[in-house]
Structure formats: structure tokens, C-alpha cells
Amino acid sequence: MEIRDFLIRVKVGTNLGIKKQYQIYQEIRKSSELSIAEWIGTTKLIKERQKDELTATLQSEQLTHEIQINEQSGGILTILDEMYPKLLREIYCPPTVLFYNGNLSLLSHQRTIAIVGARMMTSYGEQAIKCLIPGVVANQLTTVSGLAKGVDALVHEATLANAGVYHCRNWKWARYYLP
């Protein structure tokens, strides 16, 4: 199994958090002389009692099927891929795997703005977004957010309603939705 495939399988097939996934990526990249099975056997990042279960999960047909469904729904980028967003590589603990659907060239769009706020939408937040987004779209900025409910969701809806460009980063699933 290649590192890219391993990263995808860890993302889709486990409940490991983004920080642990990134630690695995960093460690496995440094241990390139080891096979994935050897790495799993020797790493301290995974508890001994979880290693056999992880190996079985990563080789399961069900996981292979789930990954195929993701690939058919859009695409999958890993931190190893050339198209992975350069700025995203530079953040603390970047996601190792991104699921996307749409125009990948938007990932390198230079004019972006992030609008963040509460998950529990207030009437003021709603008014502010409806006021801000037409100007953002008119100035050809791409809106970026984390795909949370509340402000993030309304920014997404308002951007699309104003025929703008939107991509969202959900750090748990790291899925990009691109027009």
C-alpha cells in the first residue's frame, strides 16, 4: 500500500482526529524505508491493542467500497498531491486528505475572504451577511469557511445566491465544494 492510499484509508476508515492523522503523515513520511505494515507494527502513535484492528480495517473490502463511492462523488486530494492547496499546507496541522467536488482551480484562487461567526445564527448575523456578500461577490472574492451551521452555512447560501464562488473547508471532513 502506498502512502497516499494509506492516508485516504486512515481518513475514511478510522475515527482518528485531524491532529493524529497529521502526526501519522509526518512520521510515515520520515520512515519511508518501512512498509505500511512495518510502520504500523513499530509506531508509538497507535496503541498496541489498536494495531491489529487498524490493519484489518485498512484492508477491508467495505472501506475500499466506501473510498470508491467518495471518488465517484467528486475527488480526493492528499497532502502529497501537487494540486493540494499551497496555503493550506502552511497552516498548523493541515488536513492530510481533502474530498472535493467541482473546479479544482479555485483552490489556488488568490482573492479569498473568510467570514466566520456563531453556529447559532442571530438576526444581526443574518442581516450582516446579506449586506456583505453582494459586495464580496461584486469584487470577485472567493468566500471560504468551515462548513458549520449558522454563519458559515448562510455565507455559502448567500454567495451562491449572488452567483459568487464559494469553497468551504470542513476541518473534520476536509471537504471542498466548488462550483
Image (cartoon, rainbow, N blue to C red):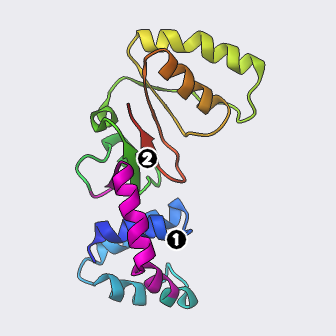
Q: Is residue 121 above or below residue 126?
A: below
Instruction: State the quadrant of the C terminus.
Output: top left
- Is residue 81 in view from this perspective? yes
Q: Which mark is residue 91?
A: 2
Residue bearing the label numbered 1: 14
Q: Quadrant of the rendered structure where residue 122 is?
A: top right
- Tell me, yes or no, whether the highlighted magenta stretch contains residue 3: no
- Is residue 25 in view from this perspective? no
Amino acid, disc 2: Ile
Amino acid, disc 1: Thr
- Few, some or many residues within 10 Å of mark 2 (<14, 14–19, 20+): few
Q: Secondary structure at mark 1?
A: loop
Q: Quadrant of the rendered structure where residue 27 is?
A: bottom left
Residue stretch in magenta: 53-80
For image coordinates 70% across by 36% down, the residue present is: 119
Instruction: State the quadrant of the N terminus.
Output: bottom left
Instruction: Report the number of numbered marks.
Output: 2
Instruction: Return the x and y of residue 26 as percentages of the image width and height.
Output: 37, 67
| CA separation in Å, label 2 and label 1 | 23 Å
Q: Is residue 25 above or below residue 100?
A: below
Q: Is residue 23 above or below residue 35?
A: above
Q: Nearer the viewer, mark 2 or mark 1?
A: 1
Name the dominant secondary structure of the magenta segment.
Answer: helix
- Tell me, yes or no, whether the highlighted magenta stretch contains residue 77: yes
Q: Is residue 140 above or below residue 83?
A: above
Instruction: Return the x and y of residue 87 as percentages of the image width and height.
Output: 35, 40
For image coordinates 49% across by 9% down, the residue present is: 135
Instruction: Return the x and y of residue 104 as percentages of the image width and height.
Output: 29, 38
Q: Which mark is residue 77?
A: none
For image coordinates 32% across by 43% down, the residue present is: 85
